[in-house]
Amino acid sequence: MIDVILCAGRSALEVALYTLLPIMVLLTIIMRLLEAYGVLDKLVQWLTPIARPFGLPGLGALALLQGSLISFIAPLPTMKAMEARGVSTRGLGATLAGVLAIAPANATFPLASYGLHVGFTLLESTIGGLTAATVTYWFFGRRLSGLREEPLAVEVRASERQPLLMIINTAGAEAIQSILGIIPMLLLSLVIVMGLQAAGAIGWLVTAMSPLLTVIGIDPVYILPTITKFLAGNTAFVGLTHETAKQPGFVPEHFWKGAGFLLHPLDLTGVAILTAGGPRIMSTIAPALAGAVVGIAVRGMITVLCG
Protein backbone atom coordinates (compact mmCIF):
# COMPACT_ATOMS: atom_id res chain seq x y z
CA MET A 1 0.00 0.00 0.00
CA ILE A 2 2.86 2.37 0.80
CA ASP A 3 4.43 1.64 -2.59
CA VAL A 4 1.10 2.37 -4.29
CA ILE A 5 0.69 5.66 -2.42
CA LEU A 6 4.26 6.79 -3.21
CA CYS A 7 3.92 5.86 -6.88
CA ALA A 8 0.54 7.60 -7.12
CA GLY A 9 1.99 10.64 -5.37
CA ARG A 10 4.80 10.94 -7.89
CA SER A 11 2.35 10.58 -10.79
CA ALA A 12 -0.06 13.13 -9.29
CA LEU A 13 2.72 15.69 -8.82
CA GLU A 14 4.07 15.09 -12.33
CA VAL A 15 0.63 15.60 -13.86
CA ALA A 16 -0.19 18.61 -11.68
CA LEU A 17 3.16 20.41 -11.88
CA TYR A 18 4.43 19.53 -15.35
CA THR A 19 1.20 19.18 -17.35
CA LEU A 20 -1.66 21.04 -15.70
CA LEU A 21 0.21 23.93 -14.06
CA PRO A 22 1.83 25.44 -17.23
CA ILE A 23 -1.49 25.29 -19.11
CA MET A 24 -3.43 26.70 -16.18
CA VAL A 25 -1.01 29.58 -15.53
CA LEU A 26 -0.85 30.63 -19.17
CA LEU A 27 -4.61 30.42 -19.75
CA THR A 28 -5.43 32.27 -16.53
CA ILE A 29 -3.06 35.09 -17.48
CA ILE A 30 -4.61 35.30 -20.95
CA MET A 31 -8.12 35.34 -19.45
CA ARG A 32 -7.18 38.17 -17.07
CA LEU A 33 -5.54 40.19 -19.85
CA LEU A 34 -8.54 39.79 -22.14
CA GLU A 35 -10.75 40.82 -19.24
CA ALA A 36 -8.66 43.87 -18.34
CA TYR A 37 -8.65 45.18 -21.92
CA GLY A 38 -12.36 44.58 -22.55
CA VAL A 39 -11.96 41.79 -25.12
CA LEU A 40 -13.66 39.20 -22.93
CA ASP A 41 -16.80 41.29 -22.49
CA LYS A 42 -17.12 41.79 -26.24
CA LEU A 43 -16.64 38.07 -26.85
CA VAL A 44 -19.30 37.26 -24.26
CA GLN A 45 -21.74 39.68 -25.90
CA TRP A 46 -21.20 37.98 -29.26
CA LEU A 47 -21.57 34.44 -27.93
CA THR A 48 -24.52 35.04 -25.56
CA PRO A 49 -27.39 35.12 -28.11
CA ILE A 50 -25.99 32.01 -29.84
CA ALA A 51 -25.59 30.04 -26.62
CA ARG A 52 -28.73 31.19 -24.77
CA PRO A 53 -31.16 28.57 -26.26
CA PHE A 54 -28.86 25.83 -24.94
CA GLY A 55 -28.86 27.29 -21.42
CA LEU A 56 -25.24 28.43 -21.74
CA PRO A 57 -23.92 31.87 -20.78
CA GLY A 58 -21.56 33.47 -23.26
CA LEU A 59 -18.56 32.41 -21.18
CA GLY A 60 -20.03 28.90 -21.01
CA ALA A 61 -19.89 28.61 -24.79
CA LEU A 62 -16.27 29.81 -24.65
CA ALA A 63 -15.50 27.10 -22.08
CA LEU A 64 -16.80 24.40 -24.42
CA LEU A 65 -14.66 25.74 -27.27
CA GLN A 66 -11.59 25.78 -25.02
CA GLY A 67 -12.14 22.17 -24.00
CA SER A 68 -12.56 21.01 -27.60
CA LEU A 69 -9.62 22.94 -29.06
CA ILE A 70 -7.05 23.28 -26.21
CA SER A 71 -7.34 20.83 -23.31
CA PHE A 72 -9.83 19.44 -20.82
CA ILE A 73 -8.39 21.76 -18.16
CA ALA A 74 -8.64 24.87 -20.36
CA PRO A 75 -12.28 25.63 -19.35
CA LEU A 76 -11.35 25.79 -15.65
CA PRO A 77 -10.08 29.42 -15.64
CA THR A 78 -13.17 30.43 -17.61
CA MET A 79 -15.48 28.64 -15.18
CA LYS A 80 -13.68 30.29 -12.25
CA ALA A 81 -14.24 33.65 -13.94
CA MET A 82 -17.92 32.76 -14.41
CA GLU A 83 -18.31 32.06 -10.71
CA ALA A 84 -16.45 35.24 -9.79
CA ARG A 85 -18.56 37.33 -12.18
CA GLY A 86 -21.76 36.12 -10.55
CA VAL A 87 -23.12 33.92 -13.36
CA SER A 88 -26.20 32.05 -12.13
CA THR A 89 -25.74 28.65 -10.53
CA ARG A 90 -28.03 27.19 -13.18
CA GLY A 91 -25.76 28.54 -15.93
CA LEU A 92 -22.71 27.13 -14.15
CA GLY A 93 -24.34 23.70 -14.00
CA ALA A 94 -25.15 23.76 -17.72
CA THR A 95 -21.56 24.77 -18.50
CA LEU A 96 -20.08 22.03 -16.31
CA ALA A 97 -22.33 19.42 -17.95
CA GLY A 98 -21.33 20.56 -21.44
CA VAL A 99 -17.62 20.54 -20.61
CA LEU A 100 -17.89 17.04 -19.11
CA ALA A 101 -19.60 15.73 -22.25
CA ILE A 102 -17.25 17.03 -24.96
CA ALA A 103 -14.19 15.31 -26.41
CA PRO A 104 -11.14 17.13 -24.97
CA ALA A 105 -8.42 18.24 -27.34
CA ASN A 106 -5.66 16.60 -25.29
CA ALA A 107 -7.19 13.22 -26.23
CA THR A 108 -8.71 13.94 -29.66
CA PHE A 109 -5.66 15.30 -31.45
CA PRO A 110 -3.05 12.81 -30.14
CA LEU A 111 -5.35 9.93 -31.11
CA ALA A 112 -5.70 11.17 -34.69
CA SER A 113 -2.47 9.36 -35.54
CA TYR A 114 -4.14 6.08 -34.53
CA GLY A 115 -7.09 6.44 -36.91
CA LEU A 116 -9.49 8.71 -35.01
CA HIS A 117 -11.41 11.00 -37.39
CA VAL A 118 -10.92 14.44 -35.82
CA GLY A 119 -13.55 16.31 -37.85
CA PHE A 120 -16.29 13.80 -37.12
CA THR A 121 -15.25 13.60 -33.46
CA LEU A 122 -15.43 17.38 -33.04
CA LEU A 123 -18.88 17.43 -34.68
CA GLU A 124 -20.43 14.73 -32.51
CA SER A 125 -18.63 16.21 -29.49
CA THR A 126 -20.29 19.58 -30.10
CA ILE A 127 -23.69 17.93 -30.43
CA GLY A 128 -23.16 15.98 -27.21
CA GLY A 129 -21.90 19.00 -25.28
CA LEU A 130 -24.82 21.20 -26.34
CA THR A 131 -27.25 18.38 -25.54
CA ALA A 132 -25.76 17.98 -22.06
CA ALA A 133 -25.94 21.73 -21.38
CA THR A 134 -29.51 21.96 -22.64
CA VAL A 135 -30.98 19.08 -20.60
CA THR A 136 -29.10 20.27 -17.51
CA TYR A 137 -30.36 23.84 -17.74
CA TRP A 138 -33.96 23.09 -18.75
CA PHE A 139 -34.53 19.78 -16.92
CA PHE A 140 -32.01 18.37 -14.43
CA GLY A 141 -30.93 21.77 -13.09
CA ARG A 142 -34.27 23.58 -13.13
CA ARG A 143 -34.21 23.78 -9.31
CA LEU A 144 -30.84 25.53 -9.29
CA SER A 145 -30.88 29.28 -8.87
CA GLY A 146 -31.24 31.14 -12.15
CA LEU A 147 -30.54 34.50 -10.55
CA ARG A 148 -27.30 36.35 -11.06
CA GLU A 149 -25.06 36.44 -7.97
CA GLU A 150 -23.05 39.40 -6.70
CA PRO A 151 -19.56 39.45 -8.25
CA LEU A 152 -16.73 38.49 -5.90
CA ALA A 153 -14.50 41.24 -4.57
CA VAL A 154 -11.52 39.93 -6.53
CA GLU A 155 -13.58 40.15 -9.72
CA VAL A 156 -14.60 43.73 -8.97
CA ARG A 157 -10.93 44.67 -8.53
CA ALA A 158 -9.99 42.79 -11.70
CA SER A 159 -12.48 44.89 -13.69
CA GLU A 160 -10.35 47.96 -12.94
CA ARG A 161 -7.35 48.56 -15.18
CA GLN A 162 -4.20 47.39 -13.40
CA PRO A 163 -0.53 47.47 -14.40
CA LEU A 164 0.42 44.64 -16.76
CA LEU A 165 2.92 43.08 -14.36
CA MET A 166 0.38 43.09 -11.52
CA ILE A 167 -2.19 41.33 -13.74
CA ILE A 168 0.33 38.63 -14.68
CA ASN A 169 1.48 38.06 -11.09
CA THR A 170 -2.06 37.98 -9.70
CA ALA A 171 -3.32 35.60 -12.38
CA GLY A 172 -0.29 33.33 -11.98
CA ALA A 173 -0.77 33.12 -8.20
CA GLU A 174 -4.47 32.35 -8.70
CA ALA A 175 -3.63 29.52 -11.12
CA ILE A 176 -1.03 28.02 -8.78
CA GLN A 177 -3.53 28.06 -5.91
CA SER A 178 -6.08 26.26 -8.10
CA ILE A 179 -3.61 23.52 -9.02
CA LEU A 180 -2.64 23.02 -5.37
CA GLY A 181 -6.33 22.49 -4.61
CA ILE A 182 -6.58 19.84 -7.33
CA ILE A 183 -3.72 17.65 -6.07
CA PRO A 184 -5.58 15.86 -3.20
CA MET A 185 -8.43 14.56 -5.40
CA LEU A 186 -6.01 13.74 -8.22
CA LEU A 187 -3.82 11.77 -5.81
CA LEU A 188 -6.82 9.91 -4.39
CA SER A 189 -8.07 8.86 -7.84
CA LEU A 190 -4.60 7.59 -8.80
CA VAL A 191 -4.28 5.65 -5.54
CA ILE A 192 -7.60 3.92 -6.31
CA VAL A 193 -6.51 3.02 -9.86
CA MET A 194 -3.05 1.79 -8.92
CA GLY A 195 -4.38 -0.06 -5.88
CA LEU A 196 -6.89 -1.95 -8.02
CA GLN A 197 -4.18 -2.76 -10.54
CA ALA A 198 -1.79 -3.98 -7.84
CA ALA A 199 -4.52 -6.17 -6.33
CA GLY A 200 -5.29 -7.71 -9.72
CA ALA A 201 -8.90 -6.48 -9.61
CA ILE A 202 -8.85 -4.90 -13.06
CA GLY A 203 -7.47 -8.03 -14.72
CA TRP A 204 -10.02 -10.16 -12.89
CA LEU A 205 -12.86 -7.87 -13.98
CA VAL A 206 -11.80 -8.05 -17.63
CA THR A 207 -11.76 -11.85 -17.47
CA ALA A 208 -15.09 -12.07 -15.63
CA MET A 209 -17.01 -9.68 -17.88
CA SER A 210 -15.80 -10.93 -21.26
CA PRO A 211 -18.28 -13.86 -21.63
CA LEU A 212 -21.30 -11.72 -20.65
CA LEU A 213 -20.41 -8.88 -22.98
CA THR A 214 -19.84 -11.30 -25.84
CA VAL A 215 -23.36 -12.70 -25.34
CA ILE A 216 -25.01 -9.25 -25.50
CA GLY A 217 -22.97 -8.21 -28.53
CA ILE A 218 -20.37 -5.89 -26.97
CA ASP A 219 -16.79 -6.60 -27.95
CA PRO A 220 -14.63 -7.36 -24.86
CA VAL A 221 -11.89 -5.22 -26.43
CA TYR A 222 -13.61 -2.21 -24.86
CA ILE A 223 -13.40 -3.46 -21.26
CA LEU A 224 -9.83 -2.49 -20.42
CA PRO A 225 -9.96 0.93 -22.20
CA THR A 226 -13.23 1.75 -20.43
CA ILE A 227 -11.94 0.82 -16.97
CA THR A 228 -8.67 2.68 -17.57
CA LYS A 229 -10.41 5.78 -18.88
CA PHE A 230 -13.01 6.13 -16.13
CA LEU A 231 -10.56 5.47 -13.32
CA ALA A 232 -7.42 7.20 -14.59
CA GLY A 233 -8.61 9.71 -17.19
CA ASN A 234 -7.91 10.56 -20.81
CA THR A 235 -4.12 10.70 -20.44
CA ALA A 236 -4.05 7.07 -19.31
CA PHE A 237 -6.46 6.15 -22.11
CA VAL A 238 -4.18 7.72 -24.71
CA GLY A 239 -1.22 5.77 -23.28
CA LEU A 240 -3.19 2.52 -23.38
CA THR A 241 -4.21 3.16 -27.00
CA HIS A 242 -0.56 3.77 -27.87
CA GLU A 243 0.30 0.33 -26.53
CA THR A 244 -2.76 -1.35 -28.08
CA ALA A 245 -1.98 0.08 -31.52
CA LYS A 246 1.32 -1.84 -31.51
CA GLN A 247 -0.53 -5.15 -31.39
CA PRO A 248 -1.22 -6.88 -34.73
CA GLY A 249 -4.97 -7.25 -34.08
CA PHE A 250 -5.63 -3.52 -33.66
CA VAL A 251 -8.36 -2.33 -36.07
CA PRO A 252 -8.85 1.46 -35.82
CA GLU A 253 -12.29 1.56 -37.49
CA HIS A 254 -13.65 -1.02 -35.05
CA PHE A 255 -11.96 0.49 -32.01
CA TRP A 256 -13.27 4.03 -32.60
CA LYS A 257 -16.87 2.83 -32.74
CA GLY A 258 -16.77 3.40 -28.99
CA ALA A 259 -15.04 6.81 -29.12
CA GLY A 260 -18.25 8.69 -28.30
CA PHE A 261 -18.58 6.76 -25.06
CA LEU A 262 -14.91 7.09 -24.08
CA LEU A 263 -13.51 10.49 -25.13
CA HIS A 264 -14.73 12.97 -22.51
CA PRO A 265 -13.61 14.31 -19.09
CA LEU A 266 -16.33 12.43 -17.17
CA ASP A 267 -13.96 10.32 -15.06
CA LEU A 268 -12.49 10.48 -11.57
CA THR A 269 -9.65 12.79 -12.56
CA GLY A 270 -11.71 15.07 -14.80
CA VAL A 271 -14.53 15.58 -12.32
CA ALA A 272 -12.07 16.25 -9.49
CA ILE A 273 -10.30 18.93 -11.53
CA LEU A 274 -13.29 20.65 -13.15
CA THR A 275 -15.26 20.97 -9.91
CA ALA A 276 -12.34 22.77 -8.26
CA GLY A 277 -13.41 26.07 -9.79
CA GLY A 278 -15.43 27.13 -6.77
CA PRO A 279 -18.16 26.17 -4.29
CA ARG A 280 -21.06 27.08 -6.56
CA ILE A 281 -19.63 24.95 -9.35
CA MET A 282 -19.28 22.05 -6.93
CA SER A 283 -22.92 22.49 -5.83
CA THR A 284 -24.11 21.75 -9.39
CA ILE A 285 -22.36 18.38 -9.61
CA ALA A 286 -25.46 16.14 -9.40
CA PRO A 287 -27.53 17.75 -12.22
CA ALA A 288 -24.38 18.35 -14.27
CA LEU A 289 -23.39 14.67 -14.11
CA ALA A 290 -26.91 13.63 -15.14
CA GLY A 291 -26.85 16.01 -18.10
CA ALA A 292 -23.34 14.92 -19.10
CA VAL A 293 -24.43 11.26 -19.13
CA VAL A 294 -27.25 12.15 -21.54
CA GLY A 295 -24.86 14.10 -23.78
CA ILE A 296 -22.33 11.25 -23.81
CA ALA A 297 -25.09 8.74 -24.61
CA VAL A 298 -26.11 10.88 -27.61
CA ARG A 299 -22.48 11.04 -28.75
CA GLY A 300 -22.09 7.29 -28.33
CA MET A 301 -25.17 6.56 -30.44
CA ILE A 302 -23.90 8.88 -33.17
CA THR A 303 -20.53 7.14 -33.34
CA VAL A 304 -22.11 3.69 -33.36
CA LEU A 305 -24.57 4.56 -36.13
CA CYS A 306 -22.39 6.86 -38.25
CA GLY A 307 -18.77 6.26 -37.24
Image (cartoon, rainbow, N blue to C red):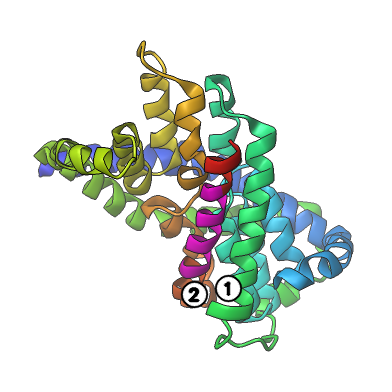
User: Which residue is at a point 15% across and 35% down the rendered structure image?
Assistant: 207
Q: Earlier in the sequence, mark 2 or mark 1?
A: 1
Q: Indicate whether residue 129 is drawn in magenta.
A: no
Which one is in front, 219 or 260?
219
186 over 144 or under it: above or below: above
97 sits left or right of 161 in the view: left
Which one is in front, 61 or 206?
206
The kind of residue on which mark 1 rests is Thr
User: Which residue is at a point 58% across and 59% down the rendered structure image?
Assistant: 174
Which one is in front, 63 or 247?
247
SS category of the residue bearing label 2:
helix
Q: Indicate whether residue 300 is drawn in magenta.
A: yes
User: Which residue is at a point 56% across and 59% down the rendered structure image?
Assistant: 295
Mark 2, residue position: 287
148 sits left or right of 74 in the view: right
Q: Quadrant of the N terminus?
A: top left
Residue 82 position in % (x across, y down) = 67, 70
Magenta region: 290-301
Mark 1, residue position: 136
